[in-house]
Each structure stands twice: as C-alpha cells, then as structure tokens.
C-alpha cells in the first residue's frame, strides 16, 4: 500500500512544483485568493529552487504564526524588555531571572526576523506573502507612563489569558507522549482556569519606577508572563517540527528546520525561567512552589529542564529525548485552537479567524511530494 501511494505522489510531483508554465492552474487549486499573485516560481524544478504549492502553504501558515508572535512579543518588550523603563512589572520579571528583559527583547527580534524572512522568501518564489495588518484592531495595555504604548493597536490580546501549563508536565513525563494520545496535568492549574493579564493593563499594574519590593498582584502578572513565554515557544518548537514533515523542497526544509531550532532554544530558556516564578496567591490565581508544592515524582522538579526521554512513535522502542508533540496530522488547525483557547485572540473579528483557519487548513493539507 505504501509503495502504491509513493508512486502516485511521484507522478503528481512534477506537476505540482511551481513552474512558470502552470501558474494559472496551480493558483486555481490553492483556493481562497491565497495566491492571488500567481505562482511564477523562480526555478523550473526542485534543483532550480522551485517550491510546491504545499511548501507555499506551510510557509504561509508559519508566516502568520510569526506575525502573531512578533505582535505579542513586541507588547512584552515595550513593557518589560531591555529598553523599557524600570517598573514593578519589569522587576517582577527579573525575579524569574535578572536577564529576563534582555531575553524578552531578543526573542522579539527573532520573531520579527522570522516573519520578515519567510514573507520575503515567499515573495521571491512568486507566492503571496501574509499580511495581517487589517486585523490590527485590538486595544492593548492602557499604560500611559511609557510613551506610545496605549495608542497602539494590536493583533493579539495579552490581558485575558488562560495559560495552558501542561507543557511542564508533558516534558517531564518519561512514559507518555501526546502523539500517543496521552494528556498532561497543568503545573499551574488556576492559570488555565481563569482569565489573567500577562502585561500591566494600566499604570497601577505597571508600578512605574519601582525596583524594590514588588506587590503581589504585579508579581502575579510577571509570573503569568513567564509561563506564557514558554507556552508560546513550546508551541512554536512543535509547530516547525510537525510542518517540516510536509515540505518537499530541500531549501524549504532547511528554512523550517533552521527557524524551528531557534523556537526550541527560546522554549528551553523560558522553561528554565518559569521554574523560578515566585510562589504566591493573587485572588483565584495560585502559583505553587514548583520545587515542592506539587505532589509529584522527582521528575517534576523545576531544574529538570531538559526533555525527559519518553516513548516516541511506538512503545516498542526504547524511550527517547524528543520535543513533543510532532504528529503533523491537523497540527496547524490544533495550533490555532491552542492559541485561541489561550485567549490570545479575544476581541478579534470573524474574518481574522476565517483567514487563520484557511491558512491552517491549507498547511495541514500540504503533502511531501517525493
Ligand atoms: Fe518565531
Ligand atoms: Fe517563537
């Protein structure tokens, strides 16, 4: 059966590479105006640098994800990055690690570069890049003590988050894998149950100028950000590994692996920092002491930040240290759902969800053509 499939794919292969001669036919099959410029590929074949419709769909979804990442990281940078003025919020972030503002600024730079690179690459191949500017409609933080913050419109909402912290337990499990159907408890269950800000919504929550004792509520906001950083980047790490399995062009594979690697580096950094979140209770939100409060086995202790070897592909194999999940089936669609459940898009319009859903479906439909 597998042999038959691969033969069929091989036959389809030559037709579906983006060639000058098949611009109209290719564009028509991709749907929904996603490739309105047409597919005037640079190369006439793989060796010459052509990419397939599937490659373009994968890259386009990744571009959208990067645009959204850039938007959220910019908000964190403005309020808690290296160039942000001193505040209780920034000091609260530094409770997790003294270098947090630098890491926040650097992560933001990385996302911006990913977004710009992928869109430029798509354009160079005659495929349409992604532009979400029409959806920049959300009110962000209303902090007025940092110039420019309150007047900017945003794509993402960081003020009503329900942060899934199951990545913490997922990466510490030595006998379960989400790709094999396993589910994982949250490390900070209350953070997933309510809606909480990860940035200061106003001057009171910013606590301008404070570099000393941070009040409990502001620290809770900084803690929330710390876990949200890791949530976002573990998603990016899995996203690239999953979608890499769908691309055909070796150069596109190189792009996906190379950018995906930095998402993994981001996640590893944030994973380490989240473990330093200050234990506290702020109303309904409870940050446990992750080194001792959770009645968990030793494998959940906070300094175990390397992925615990676990089952991979099948339980018949020895355990393996891997990122997880990486099953490509409907991955993009699930990625959008995870970000939506996170509260990141609260306030966004139906056309936004329509476009993001279309991009996800097209990426999920991409198939490696060898
Ligand atoms: Fe990125
Ligand atoms: Fe990222």
Image: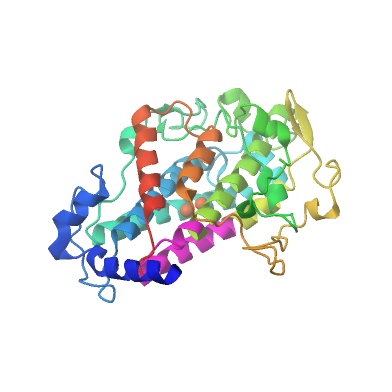
Percent coordinates x, y for residue 184 in the rendering = 70, 45
Q: Which residues are magenta?
A: 242-266
Of 162 and 363, the residue lying toward us: 363
* Residue 274 versus residue 42 in the image, above or below: above
Question: Residue at left 72%, top 48%?
Answer: 169
Residue at the bottom extreme, as displayed:
47
Q: Determine which quarter of the picture holds residue 195.
A: top right
Percent coordinates x, y for residue 340 in the rendering = 50, 35
Percent coordinates x, y for residue 93 in the rendering = 66, 42
Question: Residue at left 64%, top 56%?
Answer: 269
Which image quarter is the N terminus in? bottom left
Q: Is residue 262 magenta-colored?
A: yes
Percent coordinates x, y for residue 183 in the rendering = 68, 45
Q: Is residue 98 visible?
A: no
Of 289 and 57, the residue lying toward us: 57
* Residue 351 versus residue 335 in the image, above or below: above
Question: Residue at left 61%, top 23%?
Answer: 204
Report the label total: 0
* Residue 346 versus residue 322 in the image, above or below: above
Look at the image and name its color scheme. Answer: rainbow
Judged left or right of residue 85, residue 169 is right
Which image quarter is the C terminus in? bottom left
Q: Is residue 314 magenta-colored?
A: no
Judged left or right of residue 335, residue 355 is left
Q: Which secondary structure dominates the residues rendered in magenta?
A: helix
Question: Residue at left 69%, top 61%?
Answer: 311
Q: Is residue 169 visible?
A: yes
Judged left or right of residue 124, residue 6 is right
């Amino acid at each position: 059966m597998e042999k038959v499939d691969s033969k069929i794919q091989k036959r389809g292969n030559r037709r579906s590479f983006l060639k000058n001669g098949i611009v109209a036919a290719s564009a028509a099959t991709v749907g929904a105006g996603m490739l309105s410029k047409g597919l005037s590929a640079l190369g006439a074949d793989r060796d010459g640098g052509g990419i397939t419709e599937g490659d373009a769909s994968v890259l386009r979804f990744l571009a959208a994800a990067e645009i959204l990442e850039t938007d959220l990281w910019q908000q964190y940078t403005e309020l808690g990055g290296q160039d942000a003025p001193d505040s209780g919020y920034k000091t609260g972030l530094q409770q997790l690690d003294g270098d947090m503002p630098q890491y926040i600024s650097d992560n933001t730079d990385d996302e911006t570069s990913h977004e710009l690179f992928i869109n430029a690459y798509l354009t160079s191949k005659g495929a349409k890049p992604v532009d979400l500017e029409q959806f920049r409609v959300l009110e962000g933080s209303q902090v007025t003590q940092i110039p420019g913050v309150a007047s900017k419109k945003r794509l993402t909402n960081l003020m009503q988050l329900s942060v899934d912290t199951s990545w913490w337990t997922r990466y510490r499990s030595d006998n379960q894998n989400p790709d094999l159907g396993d589910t994982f408890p949250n490390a900070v269950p209350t953070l997933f149950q309510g809606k909480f800000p990860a940035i200061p919504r106003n001057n009171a929550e910013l606590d301008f100028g404070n570099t000393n004792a941070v009040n409990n509520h502001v620290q809770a906001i900084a803690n929330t950000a710390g876990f949200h950083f890791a949530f976002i980047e573990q998603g990016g790490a899995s996203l690239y590994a999953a979608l890499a399995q769908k691309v055909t062009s070796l150069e596109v594979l190189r792009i996906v692996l190379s950018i995906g690697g930095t998402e993994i580096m981001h996640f590893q950094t944030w994973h380490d920092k989240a473990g330093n979140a200050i234990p506290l209770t702020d109303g309904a939100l409870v940050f446990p002491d992750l080194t001792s409060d959770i009645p968990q086995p030793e494998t959940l202790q906070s300094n175990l930040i390397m992925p615990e070897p676990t089952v991979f592909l099948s339980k018949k194999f020895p355990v393996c240290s891997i990122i997880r999940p990486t099953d490509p089936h409907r991955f993009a669609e699930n990625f959008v759902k995870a970000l939506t459940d996170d509260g990141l898009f609260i306030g966004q319009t139906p056309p936004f969800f329509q476009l993001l859903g279309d991009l996800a479906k097209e990426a999920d439909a991409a198939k490696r053509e060898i």
